[in-house]
Image (cartoon, rainbow, N blue to C red):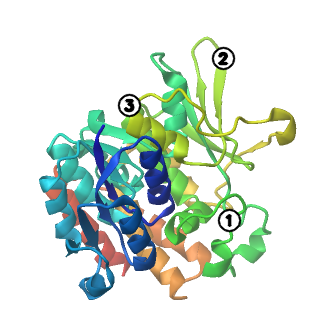
Amino acid sequence: MSSIVLLGSTGSIGVNTLLVAQRYHIQIEALVAGQNITLLNQQIAQYHPKVVVIANASDRPKVQHPDVRCGKEAILTLIEESQSELIVNALVGYVGLAPTLKATQLGKRVALANKESLVVAGSFIDISLITPIDSEHFGLWYLIEKRQPQKLYITASGGAFREWELSKIKDATFADALKHPNWSMGDKITIDSATMTNKLFELLEAKWLFHTSNIDAVIEKKSIIHALCEFPDGSTTAHFAGVDMKLPIAFALKGEVTENILPPIHLLEIGTLEFMPIESSRYPIWSIKEDILKHPHLGVVINAANEVAIEKFQKEACRFFDMSDIILQAYEKFHHHLPKNIDEVIALDEEVRAYVS
């Protein structure tokens, strides 16, 4: 592979993608970023992209590049014009859907970290062009190979409040929810981890990627095991790896990786491993797990309601558990909807957001 287009270059996935691309001498054709212009300028100086796209036109004078474009439409135009065969989509939220659709419609491969693409529109995306760079889905892919598993499992950290007394969680603040015990990611994914919405999304992604509804998730506090596969012969295999996204990114960019990307896991240093159930009393969103796997087209409802709910929580317009209530109410309200094409998905997204707002 000679070059890539990187969407979401200033987030943690984007930063790691640039490091992996540099290691394998892969050119960066274009960078797409949000509002972290300081880091973007450092990336421009180091990786020399031909084109840069940012979110807000007001930031254009600050960007140190001769070809700076702005807005969502500019991302789609960039993908159309690009020479790269691989688009790395590390955008966060619903904004990542349109670029995934555009790239796959053009026959380009997508290294996908944007959960919302498959959650919202999995039935309208060519899965054969998708390479997941979530650690959980990479782990499942790594374990399955050419075998047919009986059941798939992904693991959850449990989020910021896994050790809190239930009575205290209702008063938790936005800042409290960002204190993840195992890693540092962006605000949205960390809030989604605290509510377990993130893991519900990953179950939906796994459904589309691996063509099965026989999927579950459990809490594994150390985030050392990312995925497990149960096979018909009664055996179960587990994928151990450090909490570092460079490994799935390297496979997505390179196809096959034979050299050392991460330090190996030292089992004696890990000590004991503990698996715990995800309980609806602590994570109310989990009550619809079985139903959403039967009705995956309703992922658009959950995502739209969730994005609005997080904004409300950040603005202190609702409390922590209210976010799950908002999502569950919207899920019940729009449960009868069945989008037949991508235009109906977009219309339903708008309708849900209006209802929740």
**Judging from the image, what secondary structure is the residue with disc 3 in?**
loop
Q: Nearer the viewer, residue 64 or 352?
A: 64
Q: Residue at x 65, y 29 (%)?
A: 238
**Judging from the image, what secondary structure is the residue with disc 1 in?**
loop
Q: Nearer the viewer, residue 317 or 2?
A: 2
In this rendering, the count of numbered labels is 3
The amino acid on which the numbered mark 1 sits, given as a three-letter code, is: His
Q: Earlier in the sequence, mark 3 or mark 2?
A: 3
Q: In the displayed structure, does residue 211 sit left or right of residue 84?
A: right
Disc sitting over residue 211 in the figure: 3
| Cβ atoms at labels 1 and 3 below 8 Å apart | no
Q: Nearer the viewer, residue 294 or 132?
A: 132
The amino acid on which the numbered mark 3 sits, given as a three-letter code, is: His
Q: Nearer the viewer, residue 198 or 114?
A: 114
The answer to whether residue 277 is above or below residue 335 is above
Quadrant location of residue 318?
bottom right
- Circle 2 sits on which residue? 235
Q: From the image, which quarter does the N terminus lie in?
A: top left
The amino acid on which the numbered mark 2 sits, given as a three-letter code, is: Ser
The answer to whether residue 169 is above or below residue 154 is below
Q: In the displayed structure, does residue 41 sit left or right of residue 66?
A: right
Disc 2 from disc 1: Cα separation: 32 Å
Disc 3 from disc 2: Cα separation: 21 Å
Q: Which is more foreground, mark 1 or mark 3? A: 1
Q: Residue at x 39, y 55 (%)?
A: 114
- Circle 1 sits on which residue? 180
Q: From the image, which quarter does the C terminus lie in?
A: bottom left
| Residue 337 seen from this side | no
